[in-house]
Amino acid sequence: MSFSPSPDEAPHSHPSAHSLAAGQSAPRVSTLRALARLLPFARPALPRLITGAFVGLGAALASLGIPLVLQWVIDGPLLSGNRSLIVWATLGVLALGVLEALLVFLRRMLVLVPSTAVEYAVRQSFTERLLRLPVAFHDRWQSGQLLSRMMQDISMIRRWVAFGAILLLINLTTIVVGTALLFRWHWSLGVVFIVCSIPIWVMGYRFERRYGALSRRSQDQVGDLATAVEESVHGIRVLKAFGRGGHALRKFAQQAESLRATELRKGREVGVLWFWYDLVPVLALGGCLGTGIWLVSRGELSVGELFAFFAMATALRWPMGSLGFLFSFLIDTRTATDRVFEVFDAQVVIRDPESPRTIPEPRGELAFRDVNFHYPDARDTEADIIDDFELVLRPGETMALVGVTGCGKTTLTTLPTRLYDVTGGAVTLDGVDVRELRLDELRRHIGIAFEEPVLFSSSVRANVLLGRPDLDPTGAEAEEVLREALEVAQAGFVFELPDGLDTEVGEEGLSLSGGQRQRLALARVVAARPAVLVLDDPLSALDVDTEALVEAGLRRVLADTTALIVAHRPSTVALADRVAVMRDGRIEAVGTHAELLRTSEHYRHLIVSIASEDRP
Ligand SMILES: Nc1ncnc2c1ncn2[C@@H]1O[C@H](COP(=O)(O)OP(=O)(O)OP(=O)(O)O)[C@@H](O)[C@H]1O
């Protein structure tokens, strides 16, 4: 059985959170409807959960049976002095107690596996969603918010499924059955009990409204706190270098203080609620005691019934007292569910086309046809970052892209692989709009290396072969591809690492130097052997000698590969057959280095400025 439904299966009761800023809540729907969204994940686990609920109900009914036996023994065998029946009744009470304990144990065992399965399924789908969501989504959402949803909120959902939901169901049923039994002994006992319980329902309603907002605030603040910790740990070198550890700590303390204040307010709300939920059963008991004694004095109630009533009221104390805790738990879980579904509701705007086309053997003609682009959060009044951009890279051609900082070069490199989609015009590969290709095919044909090289906590081998899932990593072909890619990228240093190719390069490869990481990232894109390479200033962290060696290797690879290379150095420009000059998101001129030196003043200016920057 599968525990991983697609999040798309989940009923969409919220409008898409795509339009919502991170952490902003969707319009409120009822708590039941909000929690019902978990059903697709819980469905495979439902049989065991429902069995667990019934077993739990059996345990509760066993506990309610004890007062009935007591009533019978007091009014019957105790009055008549029948010793053997008294012994049997005592054994009966004992048996009911043991049965209750066994059923509670069985309930716990029954729900353990399904509740963890639900948690697993939600977490799995959540991660899948995060990976499918476009880069634009990740630009907007803080990593700590996502992390806290992934860990804390989903764990809370598991705890709710494991015991919160079941206990609420069992305890409410127990209260209803217990109250019905009170009516059976005497209607006025039932009426007094219900009237005394009214504050519970009033307080519960009031609590739901007030506590819901606090619960949301605190869970969002936990996300902010996680972001602060993540940023501090990630940027620890900068903080230390600038001696700003104290500043980061003070900022963290402020956020932690806000969270604490919210938690205190939550605690007070819960405290008030629990006060009522503790007080009401006592009031009910007191009210019923007076009524019961009065009824006994009038002969309308037997002593056994009065005794049983007290035993029953005691048995009802925990179910009633627990409601406060269970209501706050319910609301916290609803908030957690809302927060998780905000991510599920975010639209995957970059997806496979309905009727994909395919390019079995790409020639490698990459064309930008009248391309326009602005980031999703751009204001209407802002000009497009990429503006009527027109450029064609012939198959096998190496094109350098130059332009002043901020003119849109990096942005442009994200468009061919659809990290972002163009907002106007089209990017085509061999004449086919990249949006008409399946994403996995597109990203097989076009490879990209970023200026900031990201390595994963894994071996050198796994990092370099990331783009080659088709290869057996331990096979001879993988070994050959790996060695060739490492040679092109001049990354032979990996053989000197403690475990060679199997060395774990650590979180984001931090144990390596910037230049080493950049070379591994370059080897990764070379190993992927795409028809088109897009390289965003891939040699920026290399020294001049290493750069020359990498360039020689790249020249061999680039001989039959189309390449678009963002260049900040004259030596990178020298790799290119032609150079495209970009200015304010547009193409200003295209030609060979020599032609452009002759014809483009802006190019001459650029080359002079990047050459002087480059000089040691
Ligand atoms: N994720 C983003 N969301 C919104 N705006 C962005 C985003 N990334 C970049 N920009 C903006 O887009 C513009 C172009 O940035 P881009 O990084 O493409 O320039 P660039 O030419 O590569 O610069 P550099 O040479 O310094 O790397 C800048 O004004 C930048 O602020």
Image (tube, rainbow, N blue to C red):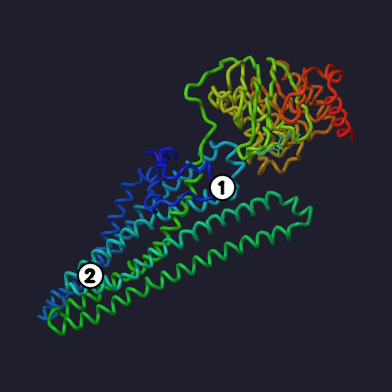
Q: From the viewer's perspective, is 538 left or right of 431?
A: right
Q: Residue at x 86, y 28 (%)?
A: 605
Q: Quarter holding the C terminus?
A: top right
For the residue pair 519 and 140, the one nearer the viewer reads as 140
Q: Residue at x 16, y 85 (%)?
A: 297
**In which quarter of the view is residue 501 placed?**
top right
| Mark 2 lies on residue | 66
**In which quarter of the view is residue 565 placed?**
top right
- Amino acid type, label 2: Ile
Q: Earlier in the sequence, mark 1 or mark 2?
A: 1
Task: Residue 170 in the image: state x and y as whole percent.
Answer: 30, 60
Task: Residue 325 in the image: state x and y as whole percent.
Answer: 41, 65
For mark 2, does the 10 Å Cα neighbourhood hold few (<14), some (14 to 19), or many (20 or more) residues? many
**In which quarter of the view is residue 431 placed?**
top right
Task: Residue 421 in the image: state x and y as whole percent.
Answer: 59, 30
For mark 1, does the 10 Å Cα neighbourhood hold few (<14), some (14 to 19), or many (20 or more) residues? some
Task: Residue 580 in the image: state x and y as whole percent.
Answer: 76, 22
Q: Residue furthest left?
A: 80
Residue 491 in view of the camera: no
Q: Quarter holding the N terminus?
A: top left
- Amino acid type, label 1: Ala
Q: From the viewer's perspective, is 200 left or right of 463?
A: left
The number of discs equals: 2
